[in-house]
Amino acid sequence: MKDDAKFRVRTRREIARLHQQLSTTMVYVTHDQVEARNTFVVAFIGSPSMNLLAGSLVETTVRDASGAKGLSGVEFRAADGAFTMALGAQWGSRLASRVGRAVILGIRPEDILIHPEGSTSEPVGTVRVRLDVVEPLGSEAFLSARVGAKEYTARVPPRGLPSAGSEVELMFNAERLHFFDAESGETLWVE
């Protein structure tokens, strides 16, 4: 497995080198999520595949106690109004030019966690849901829930699982979000 990963990295580098050297159009087909750069590909890769949610980016302004304008930020609002998520500073600067435009938020199942009950922290990217299905699979479990009309799947550790029908708060790992242009499907930011 480790050698496969090294081979994929070497192959990607060689393809990039050839692309630059030949200065020609190339088609590169992959099944690797690391290489996926658009919603068409990420919708099919992985089991389960990446969760995708249509929405828009909105500028927000935080006011201080006196009511004066303070810091501004960016939040994601689902197209169906079922979900709003304030984005941290790392996303605000990357996505500022996209404010007011339609985007697609992507999050892989392994990057959605159950927010611990009774936790005093207020994480960025939480949504309260009623679980439709809890599927323990030995070394992991899949949780299925609806956010508005969209079904989401989370891949979580198999210990201390809530039961189907229970309400939980799911937390999106803000460092692992993906954003795509709603019209073209292309990624908006790549590390």
Image (cartoon, rainbow, N blue to C red):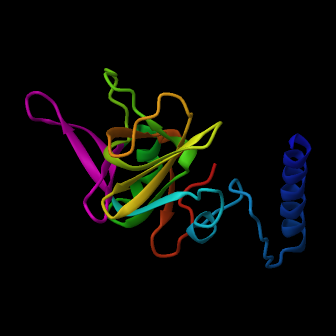
The answer to whether 82 appears left or right of 184 in the picture is: left
Residue nearest the viewer, comparing 102 with 165 = 165
Q: Is residue 68 magenta?
A: yes
Looking at the picture, how far across and down is residue 32, in whole percent?
74, 58
Residue 114 position, x and y percent, is: 43, 35
- Pinpoint residue 171: horizontal percent, then vertical percent: 41, 39
Camera-nearest residue between 142 and 164: 164
Q: Nearer the viewer, residue 14 or 144?
A: 144
Q: Residue at x 42, y 64 (%)?
A: 103
Above or below 119: residue 173: below
* Quadrant in the picture for residue 86: top left
The main secondary structure of the magenta stretch is strand
Which residue is pictured at 87% across the width and 63% down the height? 15
Q: Which residues are magenta?
A: 58-86
Left/right of residue 112 with respect to residue 73 in the rendered view: right
The residue that appears at 56% across and 62% down in the rendered structure is 187
